[in-house]
Amino acid sequence: MEIQAKVMVRGAKVFKGNIDGKDMDTAKIFTDVDLKGETSWGMCTQEIKCENSAIVDAIKHNSFPFSAMLDIRMESNGKVTTQLVTSIKPIARESSAKAAA
């Protein structure tokens, strides 16, 4: 299943290399999520895996944090659901988004 989500991207990291003879090309972004529960307030950051490092390479020139639209592919084995970012489209820097509100 493919979904779109508007998020605040706080950071990103990539790894391209070889570990024990296996080529690796991974990336993650870090986004804001609301804390829920009677003893929780505010937000925290959650990591979401990306399809490959090219997705982060395309946005690393942006000033962080920034708002973005994500395309996310959701997959499940029947017990565990995983999310994989397939594209990131920047919308605005955080200060620009607050000034427009």
Image (spheres, grey):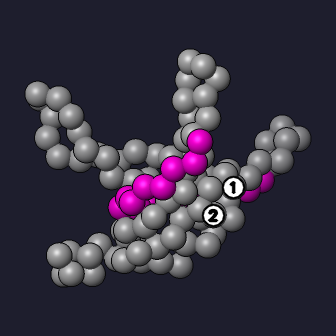
Q: CA distance from mark 2 to mark 1?
A: 6 Å
Residue in view at x 40 percent, y 45 percent: 46
Residue 36 appears in the rendering: yes
Q: Position of residue 67 (x, y in %)?
A: 37, 68
Residue 19 image label: none
Extreme residue in the left direction: 38
Residue in view at x 67 percent, y 59 percent: 53
- The quadrant of the rendering that contains the C terminus is bottom left
Decide whether residue 44 is among the magenta residues: no
Q: Residues within 10 Å of mark 1 (few under 14, many from 20)?
A: many
In this rendered view, identify the residue nearer to me: 4 or 51: 4
Q: Main secondary structure of the magenta part?
A: strand
Q: Position of residue 65 (x, y in %)?
A: 36, 68
Residue 55 image label: 2
In this rendered view, identify the residue nearer to me: 22 or 32: 32
Decide whether residue 13 is among the magenta residues: yes
Residue 95 appears in the rendering: no
Going by the numbered disc 2, the residue's amino acid type is: Ile
Span shown in magenta:
1-17
> Is 73 located above or below residue 75 in the figure?
below
- Classify mark 2: helix, strand or loop: helix
Residue contact between numbered discs 2 and 1, judged by CB atoms under 8 Å: yes
> Is 63 located above or below residue 77 in the figure?
below
Picture quadrant of residue 9: bottom left
Disc 1: which residue: 52
Q: Position of residue 95 (x, y in %)?
A: 25, 78
- Classify mark 1: helix, strand or loop: loop
Residue in view at x 33 percent, y 52 percent: 32
Q: Position of residue 35 (x, y in %)?
A: 23, 39
Going by the numbered disc 1, the residue's amino acid type is: Asn
